Amino acid sequence: MGVFKLGKMTFGSLFKKPETVLYPIETKPQPAGLKGHIAIDVETCILCGMCDRSCATNCITVNKQENYWEIDRFQCVQCGYCITVCPKKCLSMDPNYAPASTVHKADRFDVPTQDAAPAKKAAEKADAPQPAAASAEDVEKTSEAVDSALEGKIALMDPEKAEKVRAALAARNA
Amino acid sequence: MKFESEFTPIALDELHHEAAVMKVDGWRFIQTHAVNTDNGIDLYYSFMKNGHIKNLKVAGVTKENPVPSITDLFLAAFVFENEARELFGVDMRDIAIDFSGALYAPAIDEPMTIITPEQKAAREKARKAKAAKEAKGDEASAPASAEGAPRIFVMTPERRQRLDAKLATMSPEKVAKVEAALKAREAEAAAAAAGAPARPQKPLRRPLPTLARLRPLLWKRLPSKPFRSTTTSSPRLRSSTLTRPRRCAPPSPPATARHLRQPNWRQGRRLRSSMPLSRTSLH
Amino acid sequence: MGKKSIIPFGPQHPVLPEPIHLDLVVEDEVVLEATPQIGFIHRGLERLVQTKDYNQFIYVAERICGICAFGHSMGYAETIERLMGVEVPKRAEYLRVIWHELSRIHSHILWLGLAADAFGHEALFMHCWRLRERVLDLFEKTTGGRVIFSVVKVGGVQRDIDKSMLDEFISVLDGIKDEYIQICNAFLNEPSVYNRTAGIGVISPEDAWNLSMVGPFARASAVNYDVRMLGNGAYGDLSDFQPILSNNCDCYARMEVRAAEVPQSIDIIKELAARIPAGDIAVPVKGAPDIDAEACNVLEQPRGECFYYAKGNGTKYLDRMRMRTPTSQNIAGMAVALKGCDVADVNMIVLTIDPCISCTER
């Protein structure tokens, strides 16, 4: 039976750096991939709402009418699922933890309206007349062929649903 | 994916007999669980032997069918049988340690049998879609209920026709992309079929290394005999049953908990009790 | 014949690590029988499959338990992959096993600290958890989280570990190993520890088999079963894996088995890190499980064998997800081990079982 079995470790601790840091004067360096909080790049967001539908804790609210994207930091568990489903890759994980708060509030970000995007598309169309003509033909072809394909599906649906789909198609073609 | 598993349906009256056969054959009990279906509750009893899992499935158990407990054969099943009774409403009889509804004491009875209306609608829709697909006479890919089998996409004439109809409406670049993707998939399937060799099956190892072999590697000196001296007068050492390890007697299940009722603070939470409550008795 | 009394133990007790309630029928300091009771943390997580689709549910599965978090996410992902017939790339399998073995190391070091604390060795408890911090730092650097990682998805893993990081893993683990062996030496070679745990809570090998015990609890009673032997995933590529067994069947043997599993896990990580293949870390998974498709899976978590079952119903929500955790299997064994011991030994026996009650009642 020895004495001071942990003596080496204990004696060494007298001279080594302590394991803890003097928080809040010093902070521990954060690794790059740390799951801190979700950040959004509002310029790229198209308010599609995929993140709202896929959030595992229902903490994201996307309001297309009023153009904002809101996240409840208290509900968010930093799982990162919204980041993987975002089609525009505008969400990212920031390594800083969300700061503590005494009031339960959600972070709201105003998303600039997407008028710029249709303007860009129109400019492209004007620049390239040939693809524009092709796309017009495509649109005609599409509606006819798609209609015929849809008829097959409509035949299988419930009668009420079939009525609704036919009405929608008629409205679109009109 | 090294172990195999199978799901074997059995009838409710065969259950206890089958479990006894499994025990005699040396199968190890894994677990019991219940699944809520439209035709009642399906009970699954899982056993394992030599890396092979066998699930016995008793389908369509309703409240009118009492289920015999297998805790007389496998005591470890008592937790799962109590759980099945509380969360699914299965009428389990003769559980060795019976909590009488006090295991989880959920606020709603049989919570796992409740399905939200949206879920019901989604399931109906999926079922109709599958029925429609089967009615079309589609040659489906390899049945997805086969476990571990990767989905192989088979291009049938009907599918090719439908695909051609769709492609006719698309732009040429998109057509080119789709054709390229199809070719790539066919090449992959051909390569997979041609011969990725399966990983060689390793036989199960059955040695019995005891800790004695590892001890010298791990720590420097270990007691080779008990440290306590034989002349100590601790009352524990005088008791003969505790100085030698317990031998071969089969485990006797502890007495049922029926005489131990919930303390009074908990009775208020229970909305319904199926058995009359009595006070804790000390005897 | 003395008077019998019933002592309620738990769910709140300074030495009890988990909220389990035991009614101990005691006569003159000897426990005649112990009736376990659980149900204090039942959150109904299995019911959440109805509101979370099969991709979101992995984040729920992780949060069943803080110690076995990675095991649950990995086991769930493997079950859904079996259900849908998805083949995961080799590199993803290796990464999952490396993280899982690291999770086992952290769990066993945590457990050793708790055992020491229950004995009263608070300094040892602090040292163990200090070592555990180094493991948590490794997790933080590679997955972004210390306890809940969210790095596994159905079809693979979400993050990669590059070569320099793997080398750092190995150097940190080697650093831990020396100190860890010193700590084990200090703890397990101690006569007071030996006196309090040797010969206590004995479960014979036949009883262990009949009670279907799993994990180090069973392996200390010479039950030769470890799911890693079956060679699932990257475990099949290990050159030599033998479970650590003991024939002594008492509390001390359980402590030894658990303590010896940590160097074994360090060796597994080193071997896999040296042989990890290059490649993708995930495959895209589209669609939903078929109607009435069923799959089951087993995984060796730090506490034992964990069984998963999944059933699909054609929608993106699963019909049923079942996770049977090792402690729910071991409760019967615990009730039998507690028979005949002293009241003072109850907490040691409960600790050497290494219960994880939040896993047991999801």
Image (cartoon, rainbow, N blue to C red):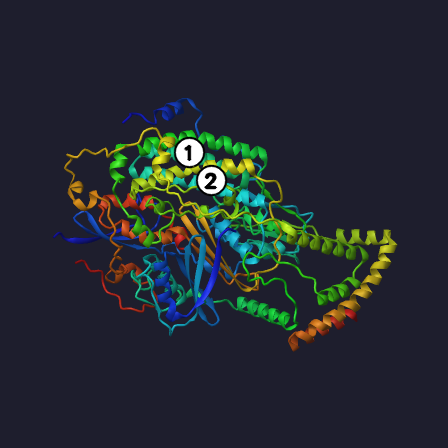
| Label 2: element kind | loop
Could you give the CA–CA distance between mark 2 and mark 1, rounded to whole angstroms?
A: 31 Å
Instruction: Identify which residue, A161 or A99, lies in the foreground.
Output: A161
Chain for mark 2? C
* Left or right of residue B250: residue C109: right
Disc 2: CA contacts within 10 A as few (<14), some (14-19) or many (>=20): few
The quarter of the image holding the C terminus of chain C is bottom left
Instruction: Identify which residue, C52 or C115, lies in the foreground.
Output: C115
Q: Residue, x 40% and y 36% (percent of image)? A: C129
Q: Residue, x 69% and y 47% (percent of image)? A: A43
Q: Which mark is residue C130?
A: 1
Q: Position of residue A21 (x, y in %)?
A: 46, 30
**Quarter of the rendering containing residue B27:** bottom left
Q: Which mark is residue C240?
A: 2
Instruction: Identify which residue, C68 or B204, lies in the foreground.
Output: B204
Q: Position of residue C103 (x, y in %)?
A: 46, 42
